[in-house]
Image (tube, helix red, strand yellow):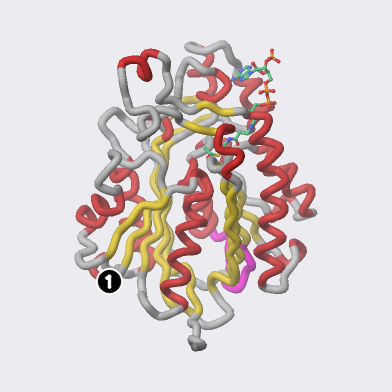
């Protein structure tokens, strides 16, 4: 059976980061680090941190509302909500269900998806299939993480890297050959140990011992993740572009996961994409995990960095290990 596929594209974008900011100088006061070290090794200057009591769904709700406004679509028109997160409000119910109720997306299906920092591009890929096949018309794709809740603020090798935020997009049908042209997903579970929070699940449920030994915090082999990130961002970008017969030379805007400026620059260098075609905001937000790419996309869209017809490539990597890339021909969503 062959199915006549439609085009699927982004109709609107939105993002939200909490007001509270921690600068590198703030970190100098409680861990053995310097602004100079953080800026040279990562490019990060500040990150936004959720106030106490604020959860993933609070951030997601703000980003989603902005994306719906930008798309000019009421929440009741949303058929499905996919929320990419590793820091949902609680183990269950899903953050997507909480969000569905908050925004009034009555009748929409809702589920969370976990793929670390690659999560939003994974979610975009899933949503694209439903739109292309005509099963759904409007899907809200959210990336949200509140990594400050999993951050060990006594571990200088990780605590300076992360920030909190949310980004969202509304997907809908567009002309064939526009919108999402190709996506590429990947995973290598042999690298699961390189980046993890080991306690709090079914293997090591929360106990006095796990709390005392700080096992509910992020542990990372930074150097190994770095090497993997550069290699996979290049490969995944080329793969998604290749699927639609494009090359890095055709790219108008490259939107990489914002984890570390050195990783972005190394990948850009290998892809031979000119610096002015690369979107970077890691200095302002740090690594916001699943929110990083949709926040960048929203900023690029609202600031006019993306024009109709532009070829945009988004690529992420993260815990799992996972990676995901998407090549898009930008349609003109409202702002
Ligand atoms: N301030 C000062 N010194 C520090 C700090 C800090 N904040 N952190 C580490 N150091 C020290 C280390 O202790 C080490 O000291 P030593 O040589 O005396 O042992 C030295 O700096 C070098 O440490 P490295 O870890 O080798 O530094 P590197 O240049 O690799 O940078 C970094 C570390 C920034 C973590 C880098 O490896 C990186 O960015 N890796 C990728 C991380 C990443 O992208 N993770 C996100 C994955 S996405 C997700 O799913 C969440």
Q: Residue at 60% across / 40% down in the picture?
A: 190
The answer to which image quadrant residue 252 occupies is bottom right
Q: Which residue is mark 1?
A: 77
Residue 234 location (% of width, % of height): 72, 52
Relative placement, left or right, of 272 versus 111 is: right
Give the residue furthest to the front.
203
Q: Nearer the viewer, residue 207 or 245?
A: 207
Q: Residue at 42% across / 18% down in the picture?
A: 214
Q: Nearer the viewer, residue 49 or 84?
A: 84
Residue 164 location (% of width, % of height): 42, 37
Q: Nearer the viewer, residue 12 or 137?
A: 137
Tell me if residue 143 comes above or below residue 165 in the rendering: below
Q: Is residue 248 magenta?
A: no
Relative placement, left or right, of 270 versus 276 is: right
Residue 226 location (% of width, % of height): 67, 35
Q: Main secondary structure of the magenta part?
A: loop
Q: Where's the C terminus, which quadrant?
A: bottom left
> Which secondary structure lies at badge 1?
helix
Q: Report the span colored magenta.
A: 303-312
Residue 207 location (% of width, % of height): 31, 20
Relative placement, left or right, of 6 versus 34 is: left
Q: Is residue 304 magenta?
A: yes
């Amino acid at each position: 059976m062959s199915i006549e596929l439609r085009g699927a594209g982004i109709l609107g974008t939105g993002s939200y980061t909490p007001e509270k900011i921690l600068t590198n100088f703030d970190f100098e006061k409680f861990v053995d680090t310097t602004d100079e070290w953080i800026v040279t090794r990562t490019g990060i200057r500040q990150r936004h941190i959720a106030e106490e009591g604020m959860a993933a769904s609070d951030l997601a709700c703000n980003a989603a509302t902005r994306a719906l406004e930008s798309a000019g679509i009421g929440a009741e028109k949303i058929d499905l909500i996919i929320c990419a997160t590793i820091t949902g409000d609680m183990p269950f119910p899903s953050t997507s269900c909480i969000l569905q109720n908050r925004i009034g997306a009555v009748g929409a299906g809702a589920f969370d998806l976990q793929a670390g920092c690659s999560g939003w591009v994974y979610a975009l890929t899933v949503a694209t299939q439903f739109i292309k096949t005509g099963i759904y018309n409007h899907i809200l794709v959210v990336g949200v993480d509140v990594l400050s809740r999993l951050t060990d603020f006594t571990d200088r090798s990780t605590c300076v890297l992360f920030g909190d935020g949310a980004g969202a997009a509304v997907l809908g049908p567009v002309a064939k050959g526009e919108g999402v042209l190709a996506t590429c997903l990947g995973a290598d579970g042999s690298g699961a140990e390189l980046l993890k929070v080991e306690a709090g699940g079914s293997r090591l449920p929360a106990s006095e011992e796990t709390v005392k030994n700080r096992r509910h915090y992020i542990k990372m082999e930074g150097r190994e993740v770095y090497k993997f990130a550069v290699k996979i961002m290049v490969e995944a970008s080329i793969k998604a572009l290749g699927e639609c017969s494009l090359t890095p030379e055709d790219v108008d805007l490259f939107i990489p996961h914002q984890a570390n400026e050195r990783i972005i620059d190394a990948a850009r260098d290998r892809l031979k994409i000119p610096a002015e075609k690369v979107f970077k905001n890691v200095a302002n937000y740090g690594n916001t995990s699943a929110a990083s790419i949709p926040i960048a996309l929203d900023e690029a869209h609202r600031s006019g960095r993306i024009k109709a017809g532009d070829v945009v490539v988004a690529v992420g990597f993260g815990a799992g290990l996972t990676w995901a890339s998407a090549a898009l021909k930008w349609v003109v969503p409202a702002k």
